[in-house]
Image (tube, rainbow, N blue to C red):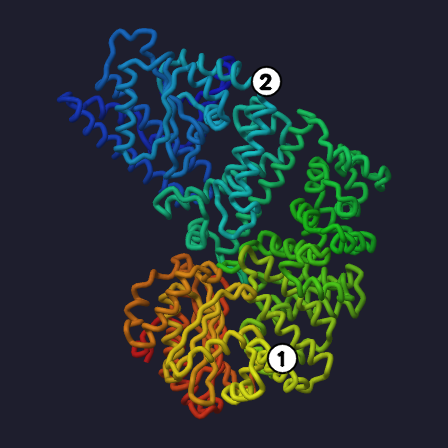
Amino acid sequence: MLGADAGLPFGTAHAYVCTMRRTFEQLPNRRAIVDRRVLAEALAALPGKGDAQLRRGATAILKAALDAGRAEIARRLTEHPSRGLEAANAQAYLVDQVIVALADFTVARLYPINNPTASERLLLLAVGGYGRGEMAPFSDVDIGFVTPWKQTPWAEQAIESMLYALWDLGLKVGHSSRSLDDMVRQAKGDVTVRTALLEARYLWGDEALYEEAATRFDQEVRSGTEREFVADKLAERNARHIRMGDTRYVVEPNVKEGKGGLRDLHALFWIGKYAYKVRSSRELKEAGLFTADEYRLFHRADNFLWAVRCHLHLIAGRAEDRLTFDYQREIAQRMHYADRPGKPAVERFMQFYFLQAKTVGSLTGLFLAHLEERYNRRHSGERIKRLLRSPRKLNGFTVDRGRLAIPRDDFFAEEPVRLVEAFALAAQTKMEIHPLAMRCATRDAKLAASVRRDPRANALFLDLLTSPNDPELVLRWMNETGVLGRFVPDFARVVAQMQFDMYHHYTVDEHTIRALGLLARIEQGTLKADHPLASAVMEQVVSRRVLYVAVLLHDIAKGRGGDHSVLGAEVALRVCPRLGLTRAETETVSWLVRHHLLMSATAFKRDLSDFKTILDFTATVQSLERLRLLLVLTTVDIRAVGPGTWNGWKGQLLADLYEGAEEVLRLGHKQKGRAERIEAKQEGLRDAMGWDADALAAYVRRLPEPYWIAEPADVLEANARVVTQADDAPLSIAAQVYPERGATLVTVYATDHPGLFFRIAGAINVAGGNIIDARIHTTRDGMALDNFLVQDPLGRPFDEAEQLQRIRVTIEDALAGRVRLTDRLKAKPLPRLRADAFAIEPNVLVDNKASNRFTVVEVNARDRPALLNQLAHALFQSKVTIHSAHVSTYGERAVDTFYLTDLTGDKIALSSKIKGLERRLLAAAAGRALEEAA
């Protein structure tokens, strides 16, 4: 019988099967991986003392060969870490030799048959990726057993014996056992079976049966079903992309299943093999599907992605295909990436990864264009309508089935400004660009550099950027071809640039393009429900094109080794005049880029009821137009970070800051209206509670003036109901869903005493909540009235009665001393291990200038459960009073800000007191015991 080295591909006619080069011919020094002859001799030498003993002996020999081969493959990958395809081939070759040796041993020693009948024939196929000759270290071993007709007892025994042996070897086996008729019938009815058999490779067994199977698959399954197969694979691909996030630029990509990953390359090969009968990826070029340059890109992406996948399996010690943060750094080190100024090795590695994913996307578009040309699908009704609407005169461009096309191959080379014009026209007419035109644009992208100073090219680009038809998709096409990076070279530096943190979900270029798409949708009014304030403010914006350019450039300087806001402002001063912006517009864009983080930092980290916060913010903003521009820019920047980053609480904080700043900028830099606002809130509370003037006056006398500024009207009413219902009780707790903030409002009304805050914070964490904001108030008669906004670990409000009751009971038990919080917190699950991939040095900043009344302390630390509780306990030990706490998280990083005074109500001024405070907070932030820090 032929062994695995034959490597004959399934689904092809015998006429050219025999001329096929062996699958592993290019694999160097195969005997160092496994020596088939030595392995066979060792198995043959086993003494025949019963089936059980023979099986144990054979398993031990095969296991030793498998382990030794894996070690050799891992050693080679360590020595040559970029040879991914070689490692994948070697793994398949090793498994081949083990399975063939096992099959020979099984039929020779365990179940020998001297005179087999016509039905006692058996064929063993390698299918799926294994059939293609590519496996990662812990990939499934997919095999198929084929018999001519119904299985005989001998075949059943032999198959069962082989499967048990493979399982004993620790291999994860995917298997099927079919008669020839069953194989054909199931392949006809199931595209998954058909795909697996498409890549089937002869492994061991009856050659005549293999030839018959190959011929029947070709004639009865494949012939005439090419269009159906292509449609099924494309639908399957689209569904997979949606399931995996529908972008190739997520910062924790799935190397196998993600968009731009190995499965996309495999899909191209499957379609090429099925529709064009290519026998190897190299023949995609010979079939005219790729040019020589495009095939080189295909091969490079395939090789790189296989290298990453093999490293990933070896590091994880199991089948793992998601490239999470905790693996990225180690793989970058294994593949010999080095740090560069402003860009660590892990970011350089991931940038190259995303460039390969981008290549896969471009090649897919070209491939699909060829398929469409071949099958010439009928126009859909929508495409016909679009065709009829399409203008006939397009400056030399043509329209092909409703898509923007070019009349000849050298169209862009003749006049490079057309490279920009093509995308501007696509945005203007809402037409797709024909994939073959995209191929030419990709090839000629470098010519875009020659028209950077061309006024017409820059005017066209600005028209595209500010298109009322939503520029997001067209800008993405322009980026995919490389024209955007060539035309705006600063943008090229952030293409595929990842940010190694758990906050940003996308690469910088993808984040930027998504932000522009969000801006266009806000302007069109389609996001009013999500962003009512930004939608309303956008209608008042005068400097429309300033805003679009600022969004394009806001992250342009990331990865340059400095403050990207400062460096980006300098880039804006260079780029904006070239795009045709006036001096005034250029100055505004530069200012917006420089300060694009100002509004979120102020809203999320500072106490907005402290009037100095508003004054400091408006001193930087200085004009209402800048305030409007900054609000919209901040909104789309946060929303484009990734799913779940934006929530109602952030929207409310930005709205509070905007309204406070707008009032100051309209009325001047005096604190006008404060008394009127307090009086209006008190009158509104009286109406809501049904109080008379005396009842309101009595309630107002108990609460200090800052309380009325800090809390919105609905919280004032909720607090009043808690206080009035408490009577003289020493403790009252209320928890209710607060949908406007996307959180749960927890109010604690209790006798004030030292340590109250850290105990409440610990109790909320024990109950499963995360505190996102806290307002701490003390009445004039010695009661604490504290409001906490709480979410669950996924950023959602606690909205079930059981959850609300758990919070109430846990706080009551903690304040009554019925539970030891320390023990309960230690028993909580450890923080997510992914955060361990990031080195975050704890930092404490003490600022006595940010507020007129308070010392403002900002603590930066790695986010983890009970962090706020530990920081609050450190403040309790420091004998300070907490007036408010503001909690922000950015992926793995937490930024907690406290407004403090000493016990006499003054700012903390003594340097010894400040140093002690810093020391305790640093210890808490690092998770160390205070004594250890000392």
854 or 674: which is nearer to us?
Answer: 674
In which quadrant of the rendered view does residue 751 lie? bottom left
Residue pointed to by mark 2:
224
Q: Nearer the viewer, residue 844 or 730?
A: 730
Q: Amino acid at mark 2?
A: Gly
> Is 83 displayed left or right of 664 in the figure?
left
Residue 130 placement (x, y as % from top left): 42, 30
Location of residue 577 in the rendering, given as x and y in whole percent from the top left corner: 78, 63
| Residue at figure coordinates x 64%, y 68% from the top left | 596
Q: Nearer the viewer, residue 109 or 603?
A: 603
Q: What's the residue type where badge 1 is placed?
A: Ile
Q: Of the residues tagged 2 and 1, which is closer to the observer? A: 1
Give the residue at mark 1: 614
Q: From the top left corner, tell me how far across and down residue 256 is, in percent.
A: 48, 40
Q: Residue furthest right?
A: 393
> Does residue 268 appear to the left or right of 157 in the view shown?
right
Q: Are marks 2 and 1 in contact (CB under 8 Å)?
A: no
Q: Is residue 569 visible?
A: no
